[in-house]
Image: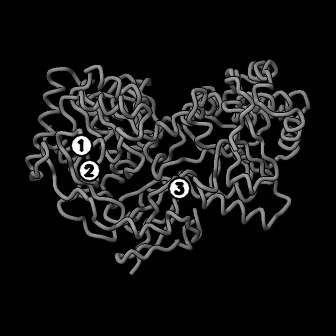
Amino acid sequence: MSTRTTCPYCGVGCGVLAAPDGTVTGDPDHPANFGRLCSKGAALGQTIDLEGRLLSPMVDGAEADWDRALDLVASQFQTAVRDHGPDSVAFYVSGQLLTEDYYVANKLMKGFIGSANIDTNSRLCMASSVAGHKRAFGTDTVPGTYRDLEEADLIVLVGSNLAWCHPVLHQRIAAAKAARPAMQIVNIDPRRTATTELADLHLQIAPDGDVALFNGLLAYLSHGGHIDRTYVDAHVAGFEDACGAAAATDLAKTGLSAADLAAFCSLWAETPKVVTVYSQGVNQSTSGADKVNAILNCHLATGRIGKPGAGPFSVTGQPNAMGGREVGGLANMLANHLDIENADHRHTVQDFWQSPTICTTAGLKAVDLFEACASGQIKALWVMSTNPAVSLPGANQVADAIANVPFTVVSDIMARTDTGDLANVLLPATGWGEKDGTVTNSERRISRQRAFLPAPGAARPDWKIICDVAARMGWADAFSYSTPAEVFAEYVALSGASARFDRDLNLSEFADADYTNLEPTQWPRNDTRFFADGQFYHPDGKARMLAVRAPDVPETTGFRPN
């Protein structure tokens, strides 16, 4: 018998039907993929064997029972906080965690330990989008839906090899173009990739030339009379400064010919139903946030946002990067898209949690966190469902930094990882197919991951491990959940408690949801788009266009990748 669950790979969030014998097929009723799967999703059945699995807690390289391991973790964190303060400890978590795992980890660190030193590997792929969204909209809001990809007349792919990295979205776009051959696709990428094969126009831009390109587009829109003045005057601030910076941009920084620039700008300007999809080529850059805002500026200036087939669209790399952002699993935010810097927001969260404290300033972000490990500031570190000794930039330095921490605990499904080899304590977590909870995909759709296999050995869900440690630190009542459904219900209730702030993250649709049978559902409601009405989340209700400046692009010797 098959179980309806969700693929654990990327942020598309495809529904799958999975059976204990490893049979996996696409879920034809899931609105993210309608039965489609990529090669990774189709091969999920090959990942559920137990080879190499961590099946028992380990303390200093030897098997231990749960009580000994959990007592040690709790006592070491308590000792570090007592002797060195709450900012001497840190959690480094992951976009592979479920929302319920993320929620309790964030609650423990920010509301009970009292530090914001919890960050995630999702920062590496999504921090630029988060910053760009918050600067422009006032909140980290994805305006559109996947349906926009099929309703658009023009899709612009920026720094996104969709064919390899989000194959099901690529399949959806390819099917839409086959049905409507007049649909135009522009691929902006320094490389020629598999995605280029679908494009009508490939702009082989210079690396980090994106700000210059979209500033050039904004200047073209402004000079050519393509601005929606009614929308801008009523709903947008910063227009003149943004256009001034755009006009001053040296378009040679794009690395493109005048003919290519003219073709792109004309096509974008003359096509109202345009979706600009961007991913890691935009986000993973020293100018990533400015790239995001350069794109958003063009959509805001034309009012092409939050409408069917029109808007900017950030596609996430990890299966639950969005869920982590929603529950505050980053060092610079609170749960439910609330702000650490806002005293009313902090009071509301602390009052709801009935917690003894609340962090008052942002914590250490991913790279800074491991620099603090290297400097000796961090005395106790907990890494969950990620392998930073391999995946972070400067991996060797990160490994040395982790080795410098007096006490490190790692929760993982594998017995041997580069990070786990540096740990004092290993805690066996359940993996995909064994754990139960929710994830949020790139279009704000919350879907269930459901267990269809028993937990192997002594493995436990991450949320349960975190709660067991919290209980041993003296906070058993606040972490007394017996199921992930109870964690989810509290997260939804916190959304209700913070509703007076009129933020975007409204989970009222889930208040009476049947968690066991929860259907894939977008917040705040299915098929909702944001910002077409011009209502944003800055105090004056207006969006912000930013004056962004193109970085200097390294000189080349004429070499161009493929």
Amino acid beneath label 1: Asp
User: Can residue 529 be seen by looking at this rendering?
Assistant: no
Which tag is nearer the camera, tag 3 or tag 2? 2
User: Can residue 382 be seen by looking at this rendering?
Assistant: yes
Tell me if residue 247 comes above or below residue 168 in the rendering: above
Which tag is nearer the camera, tag 3 or tag 1? 1
Going from N to C along the chain, the mark reached first, 3 or 2, is 2
Q: How far apart are marks 1 and 2 (CA)?
A: 6 Å
Labels 1 & 2 near each other (Cβ < 8 A): yes
Identify the residue shown where x is 40% and y is 65%.
Answer: 514
Tell me residue 488's x, y (percent): 36, 53
Going from N to C along the chain, the mark reached first, 1 or 2, is 2
**For residue 551, what is the image quadrant?**
top right
Residue bearing the label numbered 3: 445
Residue bearing the label numbered 2: 416
Residue bearing the label numbered 1: 421
In the figure, is residue 397 to the left or right of 56?
right
Q: Quick one: 467 or 249, which is closer to the camera? A: 249
Q: What element carries label 3?
A: strand
Amino acid beneath label 3: Arg
